[in-house]
Each structure stands twice: as C-alpha cells, then as structure tokens.
C-alpha cells in the first residue's frame, strides 16, 4: 500500500484593518470641507445667538485642556484593543495616574510627577494584562475590578499620605494632595496677540477662525504638546512599522499571527502596559496641569468618555482626536459659560439633526430619517421656547454628547475582529 499524504495549505496571513481594501475613508480635501462647514455653522450660531464665547480663544484653550486627558485615555484604549484586549479599566488607570502624579509632583518636580503617573498607570495595565492574557479572566470583569481597586487604593493612601506631617502643613487633606509646581506653558507672542485683536472685532467667520487658532497658540502646556506628539507617534508605530502590523494582527486573528511566528502574548502584554501608561499620563495631566493637585473623584468618568471617543473614532488616532476634541469642547462649554452657551448650541444641534435626517432619507433609511427629523423639531421648539437650559442638563452635557455621538456613529464602526476574545497559545492546532 502506498500512503498518500494530503497537503494542508499554510494558514492565511492575518487580515489587519486599516488597509486600503477596507471601507473608504475621507480624503483630505473632503475633510477640510467638513471642518470649514462646522466652523461656518459655529459662526452662524454665534452671530444669531450672541454667545460670543462659543468660538473664543478662552473657550478653545479650555476645550483643549479638557480634551487632552480624554484623548490620552482613548489612545490607551486604542493600543489595548488593537491588540485584542478590551480595557474598561482605563478609568482606574487614570485614577492611579492622578494620585501618583500629584504625590511625586509636590515632593519633587512636576515632570517627575508625570513620570510617576505614567508608571502608576502602567502598573494598572500590567495587572489587567496578567488577569486577561495569562489567566483568561473576562476583560470586562477585570477592567471593572481594576477601577474599584484603584479607587479604594487611592482613597486609603490619600488619607495616609496627605493628611499628616509635611503634606498636611502644605495644604493636604484626606481628599486632596498639596499643590505641585506648574508645568511650563508656551505662547507664540506676535501670533497670539494678532489673532486676539482680530477676534475682538467679532467679524463673521474671520473672528471665529482667529479665536480658534488663538486658543491653540496661547498658554499651551508642554504636556499638551507631548500628547499631540504621542498621537502622531501612535499612528506611525501602529500603521507604518512591522511592530504595529504584528500588534494589530493579534487583535484581528491571533491564531494566524501565531502561525506566522508572532509572539502573541508578548505583543498583547506590551499593548496593555502601554495602554495603562497613556491612561496614567492622562490622569497626571489632570492633577498636574488642570488643577495642580490630586482630588478624590478627579477623573469624573473621563476614562469611560475616552473609551467612547476611541469607539467614535473607529479605533483610529485621527477619529479619536476629533472625538476627544468634541467631548472636551462640550466639557469646557458647560464649565466656562454654563447655560447660555449650551442653549446656543441647541440651534447647532437642530441644524446637525436636520442634515442627518436629510442624509438618512436620501439613503432610504426612512425610520432613522424620520426619528432624526422628529428629534430636530423637538430641539427647535426647545430652543425657541426657552432662554436657557436647566443646570442639571448643563452639568450632564459631556455625557449627553457622548451618548448622542455614539448613537449617530454606531453603523460605521468596525472593531478588531478578535477584540475581547480569550486567546490560548496553540489553540488553532
């Protein structure tokens, strides 16, 4: 008898999202047109309602400061989920970043505090990696557990470290740390002053553009500049290097990646630890740039909002940056000018909903189009019948924007195929 050997085809290379074969992305000219359209809409809202703060340099500067920690948390989630690990624990890792950043910052220097915040977040990421990758714990359960542990840990040690001795003498208490020194901010003198003078004229579109640009070049923290660099670096590393291709393959098809010689465990560990470090950096930004102290409950759910911004951005850095900017803008708006500016944005929301309704009806999505049109009518009646919005609604603006954006963008989302799935070495054999 002659034995016949059946040839087994080699495993296919993992398909990694983000290539040219996927869903078509917006071209640069189209993106510029969209940005110009949004700016025109904001200019119209400012001119009609008289809410000058909507596009002021102060508003944009505050929005940028609010967007950075959200964006860094979302960037951490992007690294983790691109490797196939869901990271609900971003909030807890941010809490660790706020605590360790402030603790080291007031004793030494703010930059040492930044480093300590990153390390604190990385420790949270390492714990999440051990639980989910090594022991196969459900990713959601592990993340929630880390959030609870981080809150309990920081609450206990804040009472222990900030409520006695030198810390108490310098303003520490059971719920806050002594203040740390400021991180250097930069302003482009001639450009900033020139843009401010144009903004004061309140010219349609021109003054709005000057206000937005002025907010981006005035009192800019060096940590904000670092955050922008990290966004660019993330895109380059994950989409332009062999390391990034291997890491993303672990989130798409880890079995195929393993068959091609990729150490899936190593890449997942690296991604989740980097994820924790970025979330910790976002926390350190809150305690060292935004307020200069650690406060209990300081993150305010920004880890979850960062996760929402990442989903809105379709697991890509550019979309994440836009989502973080949107949430930061809503957060800064309710902090700076309360009900008046939020009430003015009801008019903008009406225009957006009308546009969405028209687009959905054009695409023959009649149910969604009608729902958008009805909601637009309700928003218009609300705007015309009131002069302000309730305080409770103003405080909830960032979270309402989060829900609204996710509901409107849900149909175009494409998460990594193996995101959240348990992986065991050799499971494809």
Image: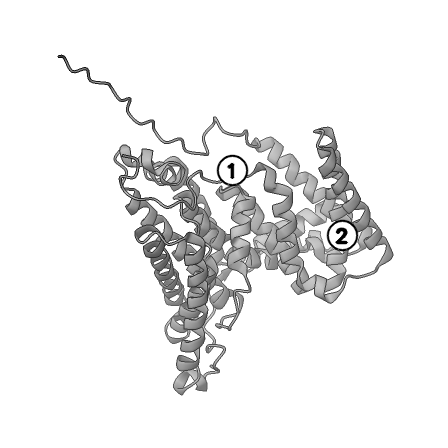
Of circles 2 and 1, the one toward us is 1
- Residue name at image x 62 percent, y 32 percent: 30
Give the image location of residue 330, x and y in percent: 65, 56
Q: Which of 83 and 226 is in front in this view?
A: 83
| Colour scheme employed for the rendering of this structure | one colour
Q: Pointer 1: what residue?
A: 414
Mark 2: few/some/many CA within 10 Å (<14, 14-19, 20+): many
Where 358 falls versus 376 (above or below)? Answer: above
Residue at far front of view: 1
Residues at marks 2 and 1, CA–CA distance in whole angstroms: 30 Å
Give the image location of residue 68, x and y in percent: 52, 56
Describe residue 81's horizontal placement relative to residue 255 as left or right: right
Q: Nearer the viewer, residue 408 or 67?
A: 408
Element type at mark 1 = loop
- Hey, which quadrant is residue 6 in on the image? top left
- Hey, which quadrant is residue 160 in on the image? bottom left
Residue at far right of view: 385
Q: Pointer 2: what residue?
A: 346
Which quadrant does the N terminus fall into? top left
Q: Is residue 337 visible?
A: no
- Residue name at image x 82 percent, y 46 percent: 377
Residue at far top of view: 1
Describe residue 273's horizontal placement relative to residue 90 as left or right: left
């Amino acid at each position: 008898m002659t034995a016949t050997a059946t040839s087994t085809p080699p495993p296919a290379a993992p398909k990694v999202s983000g290539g040219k074969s996927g869903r078509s992305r917006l071209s640069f000219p189209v993106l510029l047109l969209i940005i110009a359209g949004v700016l025109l809409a904001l200019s119209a809202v400012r001119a009609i309602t008289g809410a000058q703060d909507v596009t002021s340099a102060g508003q944009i500067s505050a929005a940028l400061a609010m967007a950075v920690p959200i964006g860094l948390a979302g960037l951490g989630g992007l690294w983790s989920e691109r490797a196939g690990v869901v990271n609900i624990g971003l909030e807890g890792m941010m809490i660790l970043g706020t605590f360790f950043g402030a603790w080291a910052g007031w004793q030494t220097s703010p930059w040492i505090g930044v480093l300590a915040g990153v390390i604190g977040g990385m420790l949270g990421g390492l714990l999440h990696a051990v639980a989910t990758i090594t022991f196969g714990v459900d990713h959601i359960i592990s993340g929630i557990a880390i959030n609870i542990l981080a809150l309990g840990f920081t609450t206990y040690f804040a009472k222990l470290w900030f409520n006695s001795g030198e810390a108490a003498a310098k303003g520490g208490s059971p719920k806050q740390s002594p203040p740390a020194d400021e991180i250097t901010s930069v302003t482009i003198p001639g450009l900033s002053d020139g843009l401010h003078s144009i903004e004061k004229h309140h010219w349609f579109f021109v003054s709005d553009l000057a206000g937005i640009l002025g907010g981006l070049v005035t009192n800019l923290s060096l940590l904000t500049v670092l955050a922008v660099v990290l966004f660019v670096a993330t895109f380059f590393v994950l989409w332009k290097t062999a390391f990034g291709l291997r890491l993303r393959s672990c989130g798409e098809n880890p079995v195929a990646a393993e068959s091609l010689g990729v150490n899936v465990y190593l890449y997942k560990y690296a991604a989740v630890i980097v994820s924790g470090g970025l979330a910790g950096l976002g926390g350190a930004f809150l305690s060292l740039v935004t307020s200069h102290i650690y406060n209990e409950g300081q993150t305010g759910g920004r880890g979850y909002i960062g996760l929402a911004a990442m989903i809105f951005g379709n697991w890509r850095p550019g979309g994440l940056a836009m989502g973080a900017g949107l949430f930061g803008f809503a957060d800064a708006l309710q902090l700076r000018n309360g009900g008046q500016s939020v009430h003015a944005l009801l008019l903008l929301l009406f225009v957006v909903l009308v546009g969405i309704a028209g687009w959905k009806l054009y695409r023959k999505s009649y149910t969604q189009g009608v729902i958008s049109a009805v909601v637009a009518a309700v928003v218009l009646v609300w705007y015309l019948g009131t002069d302000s919005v309730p305080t409770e609604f103003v405080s909830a603006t960032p979270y309402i924007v989060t829900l609204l954006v996710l509901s409107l963008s849900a149909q175009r989302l494409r998460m990594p195929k193996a995101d959240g799935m348990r992986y065991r070495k050799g499971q494809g054999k």
